[in-house]
Image (cartoon, rainbow, N blue to C red):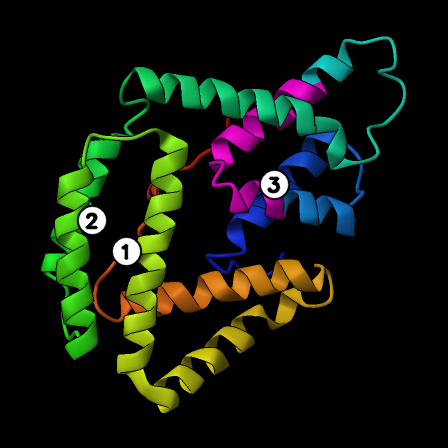
Amino acid sequence: MLPLDPEAAYYQAVEEFFVSRRGDPLFLSNADWNLVRKWRIRGIPLRVVLRGIADALDTHAHGWSRERKVGSLAYCAREVEAARERWERALAVGPEEGLDAAAALLGFASDLEWARGLGSRGAVVASAIAQRLRERAGAGRLEALTIWLSGLEEELLEALRQDAGDERLSAIDAEVEAALRPYGGRMPARVVEQIRRESVARRLLEAHGLPRLSLFHLEMGSEGSP
């Protein structure tokens, strides 16, 4: 097994679960990896993806075509989408399985207010974003909040990049490149690039004791099997 890079963990978990449930040592194709990338970009939690895969393969196991192996992860796409819709409906009713969007936004605001070692640009941007998070807490649909948080995080990351300077950014890039080297030969370039961006962002934020500003990443800390 490859060393577990935090940003690659989502992709590896999907592959391992699909292969184990399928019962055949067939690994993911480029098209399959890009499908996982689509789920990741949309912010579908790992447990929701795994639930959709499990539902699809359970249905196949009891169907007329059960003697034929499922050849692609795409077979599970419809059930993953159905699992995502159920998850979002549950969130619309109220906090579900520990995820409280309003509490999460207030938590992010506190993290920004207590961030350590921010430069001049980062300090100004972090303070402004913290205020906006407090104003928004408790309002908005999940999809809209996800997009909004992504925009806020990019504002913060840009300020952190400017404060960090070229030398520090080059060091981070080198660290990420070394961590992702094992994945380059088995995942499509666009998937590896997505993981690379996520990894750089995490390192920039962690340097100041900050989490990713993302409900998706908040859930990742407590992910498990379906």
CB within 8 Å, label 3 to label 1 = no
Q: To which residue does mark 3 refer?
A: 14
Q: Residue at x 46, y 61 (%)?
A: 198
The span from disc 3 to disc 2 (Cα, nearest Å) is: 28 Å
Q: Residues within 10 Å of mark 1 (few under 14, many from 20)?
A: many
* In this view, 103 is above or below 161: above
Q: Residue at x 25, y 30 (%)?
A: 100
Q: To which residue does mark 1 refer?
A: 211
Q: Residue at x 42, y 23 (%)?
A: 88
Residue 51 magenta-highlighted: yes
**x then y, percent, for residue 226:** 50, 26
Q: Residues within 10 Å of mark 2 (few under 14, many from 20)?
A: many
First reached walking from the N terminus: tag 3 or tag 1: 3
Q: Nearer the viewer, residue 127 or 45?
A: 127
The span from disc 1 to disc 2 (Cα, nearest Å) is: 8 Å
**x then y, percent, for residue 63:** 80, 9
Name the front one of labels 3 and 1. 1
First reached walking from the N terminus: tag 1 or tag 2: 2
**Of helix, strand and loop, which one carries label 3?**
helix
Name the front one of labels 1 and 2. 2
CB within 8 Å, label 1 to label 2 = yes
Q: Nearer the viewer, residue 20 or 69?
A: 69
